[in-house]
Amino acid sequence: MSDDLTPEMIDTAEANIRGDHRSGKISTEQFQKEMLIVARARLYALAKSQEGGNVTS
């Protein structure tokens, strides 16, 4: 299985997190934590695409 996150995967995760928060399944604090993870994933994916995949964590 690949470790690569596609923009579509990140978008889907964000939509699911927002839906869970709207429906009350997760707290505002958990929502903020998960959205931070989404933001980091977007930055990582962007850096990886710009550098040809040579990104270190």
Image (tube, rainbow, N blue to C red):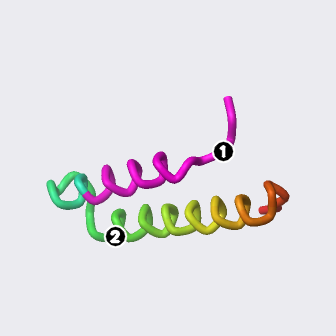
Q: How many marks?
A: 2
Q: Residues within 10 Å of mark 1 (few under 14, many from 20)?
A: few
- Describe the element under mark 2 as helix, strand or loop: helix
Give the residue at the far top of this rendering: 1
- Describe the element under mark 1 as helix, strand or loop: loop
Nearest the eye: 47 or 20: 47
> Where, by quadrant of the figure, is residue 52 drawn?
bottom right
Q: Residue at x 71, y 59 (%)?
A: 49
Q: Give the residue pinned by disc 2.
A: 29
Q: Amino acid at mark 1?
A: Asp
* Residue 9 place in picture, x, y as percent: 48, 46
Looking at the image, is mark 2 or mark 1 earlier in the sequence? 1
* Residue 21 place in picture, x, y as percent: 23, 60
Residue extent of the magenta highlight: 1-18
Q: Quick check: 46 left or right of 56?
A: left
Quadrant placement of the C terminus: bottom right
Q: Main secondary structure of the magenta part?
A: helix
Q: Is residue 29 depicted above or below 12 in this figure? A: below
Q: Amino acid at mark 2?
A: Glu
* Residue 42 place in picture, x, y as percent: 56, 63
Nearest the eye: 30 or 46: 46
* Residue 14 place in picture, x, y as percent: 38, 57
Quadrant placement of the N terminus: top right
Q: Give the residue pinned by disc 1.
A: 4
